[in-house]
Image (cartoon, rainbow, N blue to C red):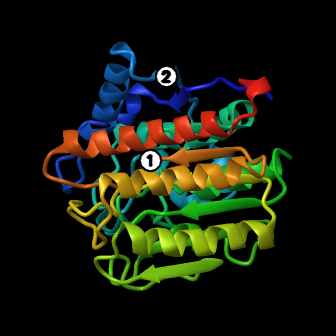
Amino acid sequence: MRFDRAMLHVVHHADYMAPRPERGTFRFDKYYLVMEELRGQAASGGAAITEHAPEPMPREWLEAVHCPDYVDEVLRAAVPREKERRIGFPVTPAITSRVRHTNGGTWLAAQLAMDHGYAANSAAGSHHALHDTGAGYCVFNDLAVAANRLIAEGDARRILIVDLDVHQGDGTASLTAGREDIFTLSLHAEKNFPVRKARSSRDVGLPDRVDDDGYMEALSRHLPEVMADFGPDFVLYQAGVDPHVEDKLGRLALSDAGLAARDRFVIAEARRRGLAIASALGGGYGDDPRIVAARHARSMLAMADENARTLPSDLC
């Protein structure tokens, strides 16, 4: 494998920034603002980034995880109204293109991680999408689709999906249930959405207002144990920033420093075992999308920096 010190390899596509639908409350502007933040950091000399554009996820790869009838509804932008209500916005042709590219983005990030140790998708982490419907602002489950394809292509044999969004990864847990080659670990606010939790391989439900110390105590207890017991050879990381104390939809109380410590710990635990790791953006909500976008950008930059720190000097 070839590695680059202090380089963030980030996947992005213009279609990630879909026009805001006429119904629903979800805002897509943060995806553009995340890249603005990253590019600004690079222009000022504060970070080095390389951008990669994904191809749309092939239909048959989506159908290997999701119900073919549902995939067809999304690709025709003909999703029934009741499913659109579960998703939180209507599925327009622009949304169709967006979700095919965001799913392709997680796949590409995984391929890049194999070359560089770590790579990020600047969108996705759509962990609420289920077999025959989307839910919770998620249309297709890029984590489950990418994991399934990595194994099918022979790129990995055992994949660990680490989900540290403030909301439980119920869709990912449901779509991978019963598989011995995919392990799902979810640390989340127990009283937050979804009300009905699925069963991950391991769930760690946290009480409201858990702070940096409490969160890191739980993470440092469970993640190394799961890695040791399951023995993954690749890691997918849902790096939602909604555990932040100021997040509009969160119930936890992590600071900026706490989020950075969380992200660095995940990368370090993977890389010291020689595991490639790819992250997806995940949740982050607030009235000012620039503040949320900055949290996401800092998250990716912290992970890229930690990846560089863990590389042997002869590979830098």
* Quadrant of the rendering where the C terminus is positioned: top right
Q: Which class describes the residues within 10 Å of circle 2: few (<14), some (14-19), or many (20+)?
A: some
Q: Nearer the viewer, residue 112 or 266?
A: 266
Q: Nearer the viewer, residue 285 or 59?
A: 285
Q: CA distance from mark 1 to mark 2?
A: 16 Å
Amino acid tagged 2 = Ile
Q: Nearer the viewer, mark 1 or mark 2?
A: 2
Q: Going 44% across and 23% down the picture, which residue do you hit?
A: 47
Rendered view: 98 above or below 194: above
Residue 261: x and y in percent read 46, 54
Kindly state the secondary structure of the residue where label 2 is placed.
Answer: strand
Q: Which class describes the residues within 10 Å of circle 1: few (<14), some (14-19), or many (20+)?
A: many
Observer able to see residue 2: no
Left or right of 94 in this view: 133: right
Labels in figure, total? 2
Observer able to see residue 277: yes
Which numbered tag is attached to residue 252?
none
Amino acid tagged 1 = Leu
Q: Going 44% across and 47% down the picture, which residue do you hit?
A: 281
Write down the residue under mark 1. 281
Residue 199: x and y in percent read 58, 82
Q: Nearer the viewer, residue 237 or 304?
A: 304
Decide which of tag 1 and tag 2 comes sooner along the chain.
2
Q: Nearer the viewer, residue 8 or 284?
A: 8
Kindly state the secondary structure of the residue where label 1 is placed.
Answer: loop
Write down the residue under mark 2. 49
Residue 133: x and y in percent read 47, 66
